[in-house]
Image (tube, helix red, strand yellow):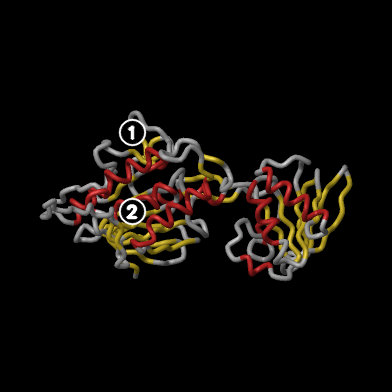
Amino acid sequence: MIKTDILIIGAGPTGLFTVFEAGLLKLKCHLIDALPQPGGQCSEIYPKKPIYDIPGFPEVLAGDLVSNLMKQIESFEPGFTLGERAETIEKQEDETFIVTTNKGTKHHAKVVAIAGGLGSFEPRKPQLENITDYEDKGVEYIIRDPELYRNKRVAIAGGGDSALDWSIFLADVASEVTLIHRRNEFRGALDSVEKVEELKKAGKINLVTPAEVTGLNGKEKLESITIKRDGEEFIQELDHFIPLFGLSPKLGPIANWGLEIEKNAIKVDNTLDYQTNIPGVYAIGDVNTYPGKLKLILCGFHEATLMCQSAYKRIFPDKKYVMKYTTVSGVDGFDGSRKEAEKAVVKSIN
């Protein structure tokens, strides 16, 4: 069983920044996320999209923001359970919690912070009659291990950043990469579109547009797909089909935890600490709602900061924490590292 002070459900920007604020209070954190890597939407959906309202950054790419947050919390040594969804929560007699994932991984925490953004993400599946028959038998909606496609024939469907970026990446891994999109225009970053065009000219990517996949074929596993283009259908043999049509946010199993829900968001009883109707369980970031709520990353950072102060008081009710600015106290990592401002040199004058 994984033990921690604060269990954070959701490894998006708000969840990651929570690790930093908790670390300043000497509280250990562990994060659960259904996605295969930290970053939430910023990593999975729009890593190359610029964000303009992060203080101190006139412009920062979503993926770079996640990288910076990961670097910021590195010294606090957070744990991660990725590719698993928080399924159940059980409150113990000592007021702690055990949270179990859909894969049976158990986590024991003194405080639970739900920072799930808009909820757990489920892939948007194409409307193909027999697609469920081939799930994990040649059809995948999220690429968790690129090595699975080493020297394999792969077809990717989609027109956004994920479809473009993974097509580019797998061009050097798979034996054959086909990118299928229903339009000639792509919604992704311009440099990614240009890179795909270059790889097409070099014969490393088969670009099929405008077209769509209309059928999946195979006996025990996927063996080929049917593609419709210009009103005609043809069969393409392959080993893997990866439709990347984005992710649909849903509150998921958390909706059954006894929390007060309002319009698919978790209601918090105040803006003092963002605690839910279950003492010891907090909701921060886009997943919560309260009067005046704004769904901004900036607001999530603020909520995480106040939540950690409340969590500290809950975990250490007999201790009084005196806040000191990091410019004064510095930052001490759990790994023994220390960041602090240089001390002024005082010289006496004779």
Residue 32: which disc?
Answer: none
Residue 281 in the image, given as x and y percentages of width and height: 29, 50
Residue 290: which disc?
Answer: 1
Dot 1 falls on a residue whose secondary structure is loop
**Above or below for 332 versus 324:** below
Specify few, some or many for label 1: CA neighbours under 10 Å numbering under 14, 14-19, or 20 or more. some
Amino acid type at mark 2:
Phe
Tell me where residue 92 sits by quadrant: bottom left
Q: Quadrant of the N terminus?
A: bottom left
Residue 244 in the image, given as x and y percentages of width and height: 65, 51
Specify few, some or many for label 2: CA neighbours under 10 Å numbering under 14, 14-19, or 20 or more. many
Residue 20: which disc?
Answer: 2
Q: Earlier in the sequence, mark 1 or mark 2?
A: 2
Name the residue: 72% across, 69% down: 220
**Position of residue 261 in the picture relative to residue 189 (left or right):** left
Amino acid type at mark 1:
Tyr
Dot 2 falls on a residue whose secondary structure is helix
Residue 121 in the image, given as x and y percentages of width and height: 52, 49
- Furthest residue in direction top, as rendered: 292
In-front residue for pair 48/57: 57
Name the residue: 39% across, 55% down: 72
Name the residue: 15% across, 49% down: 322
Residue 279 appears anywhere in the view: no
Residue 175 appears anywhere in the view: yes
Residue 79 in the image, given as x and y percentages of width and height: 38, 64
Total numbered badges shown on the rendered structure:
2
Q: How far, Cα to Cα, is label 1 from label 2?
A: 24 Å
Number of the front mark, 1 or 2:
2
**Position of residue 322 in the picture relative to residue 185 (left or right):** left
